[in-house]
Amino acid sequence: MADDWVVSINKNLDKVPQLGKDFFMFTIPQCTRQVNSQAFTPQLVSIGPYHRHVPHLQPMQTYKWQLLKQLLGETKREIKDLLDAMIDLEQETRASYEQNENIIKISHQDFAEMMLLDGCFIMERLEHNDRKSSSHNSLSRYAPFFIHTDLLMLENQLPLNVIYRLFDLKYGSEYPRQKVHDSILSYFKSFIRGLRSPKGVPSLHLLQFIHRALLPITYETSDNDYKRIKAHCVMRLRESDIKFASTDPTINQNKEAELMDIRFDNGILRIPQFEINNSTKSIFLNLMAFEQLYPGSTNHVTSYMSFLAGLIDTWKDVQYLREGEILLHTFGSDAEVASLLNFFCKEVAFNSYDKHLHEIQLQINEHFNNQSNIWRAALKKDYLKDPWVILSVASAVTLLLLTVAQTFYGIIGYYHPYS
């Protein structure tokens, strides 16, 4: 009996994949996916092994083969050259994915083929965006945000090393990495405001590249865990005489794009323009999921969305920010935007603020809790908004002062009459 038990345990152990030490291509935990499963599921194209056999994504496979044939024609290379290059990267690339039974079953040849086809698709998208004229393989008939969104899903990634290698093969030498990065920024900047070229260590995949491209220049890492503190919506903050202003999201003092450059000075909260469209929910949920799962990641995206969501309670808050050109959106109503941002705030687990926004929120709350600011705001709202009311108040104050003066001099004259 004991021997059979040992044999059974060993069989089970043989079926279990080894723990990957270096994987960075995560799958979404079920507790996160159930928040909004569609936000984490590709709609048009699969990249990598996690969704490669999903039925509704198969039509795009034909397009990938067309791109491979086009690449061979442009480079005059043999298919063996490209496959050999992918085989060289296959073991390293496979190890970057979270291992499961489906991935283990993929043969080395099939995995290398997948890398080549998916890499050709990404490379063509980046280069197509840079070209002035559209190619015969254009995907313009599809809504552009579907592909942009699919390429920024956590489970739909390919290591950038594969993309770099394909650029090298296409142009016959080591293609400048900065040119690849510029193409990535150019491709996504029309959908995400405030991107700038990441500095420091290389990014692992497209999602991390965009995550780092949103990192504020002034971002400071800290060992402290800045927990969320009470936030007040726009309409409440206005009651304490806090004003809102839009700052240019593409230019700061360093002339670099920076979406998250939020400042609070002299009672004015300055927020760069933020555009909410159909792809915003998916892109930012995937960025936040990456922050939750990747060891050592900054949490600037989660912190930013938490701060922004804290300003929104109802459609009136959205309307005020929209009219101030701070919050732009393509939805049918301000109420839809309020619901979306409330979704970010209530349904997604925000762990903490970063240092900068924690300090901003403290400054806002200090101003909000100052009773003199509330009185001043009430005075402006109730008495100083209408010019006629201002004139009436001024007249009343003048009349009151004259009456007091007349009374004062009358009393003085009574007790000190002229001799």
Image: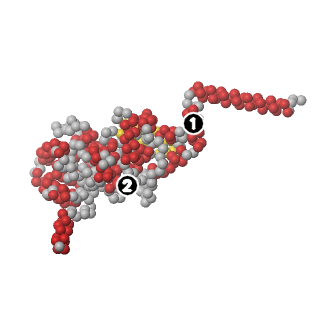
Residue that lies at the very extreme toward the right in this rendered image: 419
Q: Nearer the viewer, residue 355 or 120?
A: 355
Instruction: Determine the image quadrant of residue 87.
Output: bottom left
Give the total of numbered labels.
Answer: 2
Q: Amino acid at mark 1?
A: Ala
Q: Quadrant of the C terminus?
A: top right
Q: Nearer the viewer, residue 87 or 225?
A: 225
Mark 1 vs mark 2: which is more N-terminal? Answer: 2
The mark closer to the camera, 1 or 2, is: 1
Q: Position of residue 263 (x, y in %)?
A: 47, 45
Q: Which mark is residue 378?
A: 1
Q: Nearer the viewer, residue 254 or 337?
A: 337
Q: In the rendered view, tell whether residue 101 sits above or below residue 139.
A: below
Q: Position of residue 39 (x, y in %)?
A: 29, 45
Residue that lies at the very extreme toward the front in this rendered image: 1
Q: Amino acid at mark 2?
A: Thr
Residue 129 falls left or right of residue 71: right
Instruction: Determine the image quadrant of residue 327.
Output: top left
Q: Which residue is mark 2?
A: 298
Q: Position of residue 379 (x, y in %)?
A: 59, 35
CA separation in Å, label 1 and label 2: 40 Å
Q: Which mark is residue 171?
A: none
Q: Does residue 175 appear in this view? A: no
Q: In the rendered view, tell whether residue 164 sits above or below residue 236.
A: below
Q: Find numbered disc 1 in the image and state the secondary structure of the residue it sits on.
A: helix
